[in-house]
Amino acid sequence: MKWMQFFTPVQSLNFSETKQYIDEHTGDEIQILDVRQPGEYKDDHIPGASLIPLPQLSDRLDELDPQKPVLVY
């Protein structure tokens, strides 16, 4: 596991800031990551979001592009 990545400061956004950020960036510019469980994702999710449940995240980090910002919820 790449432990140092968990100590990197990140910026938190509130709902309106997040919506504005998504509206201002195309799907190719950002990654939206849903870390909830599959049932929660199925019930509702942000369009374009990828599902990687939190317990699986450390094993699936290679699915994320390190060159793009990631919005996690």
Image: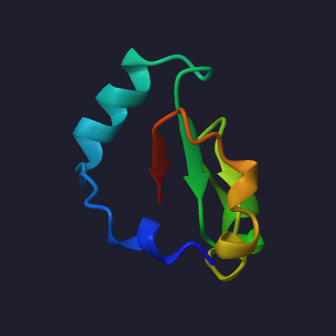
In the picture, residue 55 is in which quadrant?
A: bottom right
Instruction: Establish if 69 lies above or below 5.
Output: above
Asked whether, in this view, residue 4 is left or right of residue 15, the answer is right
Instruction: Establish if 56 lies above or below 32.
Output: below
Residue depicted at x 33% and y 39%:
18
Q: Position of residue 15 (x, y in %)?
A: 28, 47
Which color scheme is applied? rainbow
Q: Position of residue 7 (x, y in %)?
A: 33, 72
Residue depicted at x 25% and y 60%:
9
Instruction: Establish if 73 lies above or below 64.
Output: below
Asked whether, in this view, residue 29 is left or right of residue 55, the answer is left
Residue pushed farthest bottom?
55
Marks counted in the figure total: 0
In the picture, residue 2 is in which quadrant?
A: bottom right
Residue depicted at x 57% and y 38%:
31
Q: Position of residue 14 (x, y in %)?
A: 23, 50
Q: Nearer the viewer, residue 64 or 51?
A: 64
The quarter in which the N terminus is drawn is bottom right
Q: Nearer the viewer, residue 45 or 4?
A: 4
Asked whether, in this view, residue 6 is left or right of residue 61, the answer is left
Q: Position of residue 11 (x, y in %)?
A: 24, 51
